[in-house]
Image (tube, rainbow, N blue to C red):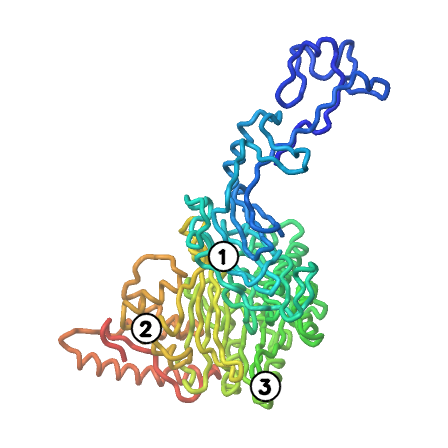
Amino acid sequence: VRMTDLGRTYRKSNEEEEEEEDEWGSVSSDDESKDGEDGEDLVDDDDSDDDDLDLDPVLEHYNFRHAGCVNRIRCMPQNPAIVATWSDAGNVNLYDTSGALDIFEASSGRGGNAGADDAGGKAKAGGGGYRKDPFFVYSGHSTEGYALDWSPVVPGRLATGDCDGNIHVWDPASALSPPPSSSPSSGNWGNSSFAVRHLYGPSKGSSDNCTNLDHPSVEDLQWSPTEGTVLAAAEAAPDAEFVLVTGDFGRHAMDQTDGALGVLSEVHRKIAKLLATNFPKASIIPSLGNNDAVVDYYLDAEDVNNTQLALAADAFRGIFKSAEEEDSFRSGGYFARDVGSGATVLSLSTVIYSQNHKPSEQSSIEDPLGQFSWMDARLAEARNAGKRVILAGHIPPTIGSYRKSQYWYDHYLQKYFDLLEKYSDVVSAQLFGHLHSDEFRVFPFQREEKSAPLLLTASVSPVFGWNPSFRIVEFDPEKGDILDWEAHYLDLDKDSTSSWQRLYSFRDAYGVDDVSVRSLRQIVSSIGSSKKVLNTFLDFQRVGVQQDACNSTCQSEWVCVLQAPSNPEYNECLLHRMRMPYSPNRLVLAVAAAVALAVTLVGAVCYRHRRRKVGYGDIDTYNIDASDDISI
């Protein structure tokens, strides 16, 4: 519908009587456009009604056939000519209105062929009887609904909710233009639709037609204006037990932002609300990262009234489950959350252990913020209760894969691994982030039967060139063991219509039965001996982004990175791998030399780890590859 000449009233001067009125009802003159003779205002006063000329508003409209009443209508933000409607017949209809809009542009605007109401009150068709049917009808809902919203992030992605509590998210085959066929066809749109399980309790809808006490009514939907990731995760795992965010809610160099502290607090609040809205039944478990501070890596471990932690606690208040959780987080940046029937997640504050931590003079504090003592107590409680514990945080206790720099101070690594040894029967997994890449670690000094896998998830941010990614992890809610995970990613090399997709399943990709330390060691051994497995790992590590080929030196570096908690261990591993000679004609000699070297290495590593108090008795050697074909 277009309306023109809305209530325009004016008095024409003598000269204007001779002027032609333009098609929009405006008056033009070569000499004057605002005033009459002698500067007289053209706008009429109360005493000159007889001289007024009132132009009736012009209404142009074109009709589209629609089955049933229109419950709701929405235009696609990327292409407003594509219109979606909810019908009380239980269908969602898509229309292409571009033809009608083109006729609007070509018309004179004076209503000569525009539709108007006749004496019977029936609307006439504008444009000589112009009609159009929907080019697609979606009939996957079980009943009618009202909730309807286009994604502002992914063109053509539409979310619809019905009175039975179902939410359907569907994508087009072509997001920016309709298929050429004018007849409805379920094969042209919605080819990836699926229903999200009911996430809300039974309720009574606001509409008389949407009253259903057995199932909840989805009255409205709204996509986030910027965050496609959380929505994609909500679609892929609507029944998630818990959602773990391993830190860095804020940007790098937050101190360069005006009003940085307030901005950071608002970022925390908005993301917490977004997560809680999209995962209403899941536990939301945040950890703070080095960018969750105005100055990177800053956290005053001696401030008993820490403003930084207090603001974060205020922002996360809606996702804490108890006052105990909030108080613990407010005072130390850590807290515990029970998940499932037999597992607990300890969300740790790890910036205080980083070699980049500020104030740097606090690195000598034996137990910053009392977290090690708190961990000891909570792990003991879990053991007494027969529960398993998942440790989660931002900065992992290892070295980085890019610069090969050690993240934690030695004395904090020692305390951490002492706790892992003490409660090896309790800790089931370690989940961390920080690296922006998809990786894992398995340390050779840990006993296989009494150690927990260290898993590093990639980032939603593509700041270092990788694709955005998140993981959906399958775990045993009674034992807390990680059983598998799926990585999902957004391919930024594709056009703007690309959507989130599954990158890989850990067990399927590597052909292992579980995500145990034993399985991780098998994979590390294969990475050191097989270029095929190495390239598979690197493709996942880079989240689908192709990089330069990895030569034998690079291969050795990766084998050592995946097994090193610190720089000394990494350097020892490299030294032994690079000393190993190999000749295809002297296979037996190479194997014998490798075995001898491995025995020497065992003694050296035992001595070092005993001195640092992170030894765990039975120590496995590093995998020492004599070549691409031989592994010891």
Residue type, label 3: Ala
Q: Nearer the viewer, residue 576 or 32?
A: 32
- 590 left or right of 411 in image: left
Q: Name the residue at 69% across, 16% down.
A: 33
Labels 3, 2: front one = 3
Question: Where is residue 2 shown, x and y percent of the image?
Answer: 62, 34
Q: Name the residue at 44% across, 72% down.
A: 485
- 618 left or right of 248 in image: left
Q: Name the residue at 52% across, 59% down.
A: 169
Q: What is the distance, in whole Å, between disc 3 and disc 2 at their CAs? A: 41 Å
Does 154 appear above or below 601?
above
The mark nearer the N terminus, 2 or 1, is 1
Q: What is the distance, in whole Å, between disc 2 and disc 1 at their CAs? A: 54 Å
Residue type, label 1: Trp
Question: Where is residue 516 shown, x and y percent of the image?
Answer: 42, 80
Q: Nearer the viewer, residue 164 or 414?
A: 164
What kind of element bears circle 2? helix
Q: Nearer the viewer, residue 479 or 98?
A: 98
Residue 290 shows in this picture: no
Residue 97 shows in this picture: yes
Q: Which mark is residue 382?
A: 3
Q: Which mark is residue 575?
A: 2
Instruction: Report the residue marked by disc 1.
Output: 170
Q: Nearer the viewer, residue 239 or 512?
A: 239
- 107 left or right of 315 in image: left
The mark nearer the N terminus, 1 or 3, is 1
Does 15 appear above or below 122?
above
- Classed neighbour count for the residue bearing mark 1: other residues with Cα under 10 Å, few (<14), some (14–19), many (≥20): some
Labels 2, 1: front one = 1
What kind of element bears circle 1? strand
